[in-house]
Image (cartoon, grey):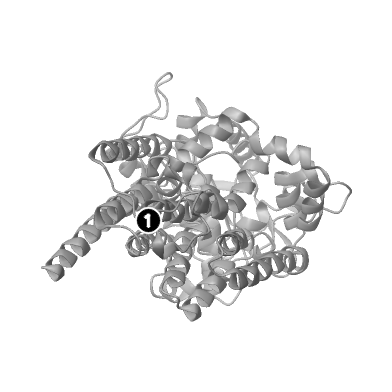
Amino acid sequence: MENQIKKKEIYSILTVSGLFLIITLGLALNRYYTFFASYDQGIFNQIFWNNLHFNFYHSSLASAISTHVTSGEELPRVDDSYLGHHFTPNLLLWLPIYYLFPSPATLVVIQVLLIVGAGVVLYFLAREYIEHSIALLIVMGFYSSIAILVPTLSNFDNISQLPILVFSLLLSLEKRNWWLFSLFALLILGVRQEAGLNLFGVGIYLIASKRYPRQGLLICLISFLYMMVITNIIMPEFTEDVGKRLMVDKFGKYIKGDNPSTLAVIWGMITQPWLVIWELISPIGKTVEYLIGQWLALALIPAVSPTAWIISIFPLLTPLLGQGKSVLSLNIRYAMMVVPGLFYGAILWWGGQSFRNFQQNINQFQPRKLTLKFKRFWISCICISLLLGFTSSTTELSRAFYFLLPDSFQPWVYVSLPRQWQHSANIYQLLEQIPKDASVSSTNNIIAHLSSRRAVIRLPNIEFINDNNEAKKVDYIIADLGELERYAVVFDKEKGWLEAINYLINELTKNKEYQIIDSKDNVILLRRNVGNT
C-alpha cells in the first residue's frame, strides 16, 4: 500500500510538472519563432555562439548597452566582454547542449527545463517536512508565482538557474550531504555576481536558527568575500560598467564621491541609516504590492515565516533599496532571486516552525494541518497569481500571450496568431538573404534571430568596432517597420525607434550608401553598397 501511495505521489508531481513544461515551452517557443523575443535573448545567444567559437563571453550586443557606448564616447565592440557586465561563469555548463543544438531556441528550452526541474526538486524538499498534498500545492504555487511564470515566458536569463540550485542546496542541507551542499554553493556563486546574496541569506539562517552556526558563518564569509572580490577587482578588469552603470544606476543615491563600487554603496548605506530605512518602505504602496505579489502563490504564508524573511531579505534589498521604474516589478528576472527563500520558509512553516520556536530543534516541530477552508483560499490565491501572471505576460516585457489579449483596447492594438505567423514567414525569407558571417543591424524583435554571428547591433546604430579595432558600418540592415508601426501608437519607445529608423533609412538610401534589396510585409532589407565603409 505504501509503495502504491508513493507511486501515486510521484505520478501527481510529474503530471503537474509535465503540464507546466508543455504549456510554458509551447508559449515560449511560439514567442521566439514569431519574433517576440527581444534584446536580452540576443545577448545571451551571442555569448553562447562566441563561447562556442572560443571568443569567450564576447558580445557586440552587450557592448552596445555599456556606459562608454550609451554615453556616445565609443562604438560597440565585437570583443567586448560580458563578464564586465555580469560575472556568469555558469553559462559554460550549458555549452555542450548548445554545441549539439546551436540556436537561440535552445536557450528557451534550457530556461523552461531549469524552472520545471526546480519545481520537482522543491517537491522533494517539501516532503522532508510536510505531507504530499501540501507539498503539491507548494509546487503548484511555485509554477504559478508571478516572479517565476513571467520571466520564464520572457527572454533567457542566467537568473533562471537560481531556483533549482538553491532548492538543491537546501535539500542537500536537509540530507546533511555537505559535499553536495558545497557543490551547489559554488554553483550558486557562479550564476552571477549578486547571487551571493542568496547564499548569504542561507548562511544567516543557519546562524540565527542555531542549526549549523559554524557552517553558516563560513558560508556568509565566503559569499561576502566572493561578491566583494568579483565586483571590485575582477569585473572592473573587463569594463567599468559594474561601477558606472550597475552601481550608479541602481544605488547612486548612497554613493558619496566619484568612485562608484559595491564597497562605496555599502559604506554609503552604513553612514546613512535613515535613508536606508526610508528606501526600504517607500514608496509604501508599491513596496506592499510587491511583497504581496511575491507571497500570493503561497497564500501569504511567507509573511509569518521567520525563515522566509531571513533568507529572502538579502536578495530583497536589491528591489527595495534600488532606484528606477522597474526595480519593484514582479515581471522582471530579478524578482526570481527572492523566490527560493520564500518557498523554503513556507515549507518550514507548514512543518511547524514559527517565530516562537525558531531556534528549537527543527525535528521536534509538529507539522500544521491543511484545513479545507484554507485549501480553498490557497487555490484561490494560486488562481489570482496565474491571472496576474497572464496579464503581465501580455505586456511589453514578454508578450507571450500576444494572440490572446490585445496590447491596447483604445486604440485597438492586436495581432492574431495566424497573422503573426504569416508576418514571421516573410521575415524568415528576408533573413535567408543575409550571409551567416555578415555584420547586421536590425530592429529589436529580429535581434535574437541574427545573434549567431560576430557583429550584430540594434538600429538605429549601424557602426561598430571590428576585431582589427577598426570602425565599420554593418553590411546589412533589416527593419520590421510594420511591428514598430503597430506598437508606436501605444508605446513611446517604439514610436521613437520608428521615427529614428525611418529617418536613417531615408538618409542612407538618398546618399546611395545602402540600397533596398528586398521588402516584404513592411519589413525592409538593405545592403551596403560596395566601396562604402
Q: Residue furthest right?
A: 257
Secondary structure, mark 1, is: loop
Location of residue 361 with respect to 39 vertically, above or below: below
| x, y percent for residue 227 | 69, 64
The residue sitting at 69% across, 63% down in the picture is: 84
In the image, farthest residue toward the bottom: 179
How far from the left and from the top, in percent, is residue 17? 28, 57
Viewer can see residue 441:
no
In the figure, 362 relative to 497: above or below?
below
- Where, by quadrant of the figure, is residue 460 drawn? top right
Q: Residues within 10 Å of mark 1 (few under 14, many from 20)?
A: many
Q: Quadrant of the C terminus?
A: bottom right
Can you give x and y, in whole percent of width and height, for residue 128 in the image?
Answer: 35, 65
Q: Residue placed farthest to the left in the image? A: 1
Q: 120 or 246, which lies in front?
A: 120
Q: Quadrant of residue 77?
A: bottom right
The residue that disc 1 covers is 351
> In this image, 449 relative to 373: left or right?
right
Residue closer to the observer: 15 or 427: 15
Residue 351 location in percent, x, y? 37, 56
Q: Quadrant of residue 483?
A: top left
Q: Nearer the viewer, residue 400 or 118?
A: 118
Residue 203 visible, this orientation:
yes
